[in-house]
Amino acid sequence: MRSPKMRRYAVIIAMALMLASVVALADVIYYYKGVITAQVTTPPLVFYSEGFPYTLNSYFSGYVNFTALSTGTGFTAKINLTNAYYAYFYHALGLVVNTPGWLYVTNVTTSGNNIIIGNMTIIVQDPHDNIMCIFQVISNGQPITNPPTVCPLSTGPYFISVLVQPVNPLSASLSETVTLYFGYNVVSNATVPLPLT
């Protein structure tokens, strides 16, 4: 038979556990209101694939198709790789900078049925072919989620080229998709990954 002292300890422990579980499950949260007003302004940069201000190498049937979104907020591309050591898609896309700032690449991911891209580099050049930025986004078949490169851009037009080193040998049925985001900081050269992607 248990002693009254032991029963008392058991009751105290049980009450302590119940109290702790209530305290651990109870949250008190205070909310404070903030108001954010959004308005439309001129975009700091705009992608383009045809027309103004320069002719590009955006489309060659069977090889490459870079298309800027009609809103100028991004692009889609389809590139065809062969057994070549490199594939260089020179001046495939245009970029017009309306506000000085710092360009970077972030949130790089890949998907597909196999790895066919060994290395991928995005090159930004000015109209005189001076290299302004080099972003390596895939290295040894793996995406570089947040490449460390940040490059300052002044207002004006730029070209975007893509250099790809395929993984050989390639089979015709293989494909891989690279998704990435260009960040453009108009305040400082800090890179901030896109949350929730």
Image (tube, rainbow, N blue to C red):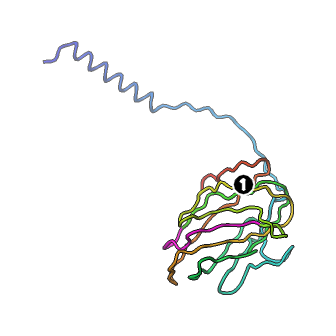
Asked if residue 122 is among those painted magenta in the image, a careful observer would answer: yes
The quadrant in which the C terminus is found is bottom right
Magenta segment, principal secondary structure? Answer: strand
The segment highlighted magenta reads: 111-124
Q: Residue at x 35, y 26 (%)?
A: 17
User: Is 42 positioned to the left or the right of 62 in the image?
Assistant: right
The quadrant in which the N terminus is found is top left
Residue at label 1? 150
Residue 122 percent across, percent down from the top left: 68, 66
User: Is 2 positioned to the left or the right of 17 in the image?
Assistant: left
User: Is 192 positioned to the left or the right of 98 in the image?
Assistant: left
Q: Residues within 10 Å of mark 1 (few under 14, many from 20)?
A: many
**Front residue (pair 59, 196):** 59
Q: Residue furthest left?
A: 1
**Front residue (pair 176, 42):** 176
Asked if residue 100 is among those painted magenta in the image, a careful observer would answer: no
Up the image or down, 8 lies above or below 158; here it is above
Q: Secondary structure at mark 1?
A: loop
**Front residue (pair 61, 6):** 61
Up the image or down, 23 lies above or below 69; here it is above
**Front residue (pair 157, 50):** 157
Residue 73 percent across, percent down from the top left: 75, 64
Marker count (numbered):
1
Residue 125 percent across, percent down from the top left: 78, 67
Residue 153 percent across, percent down from the top left: 81, 58
Which amino acid type is marked by label 1? Val
Up the image or down, 156 lies above or below 194; here it is below
Q: Residue at x 82, y 66 (%)?
A: 126
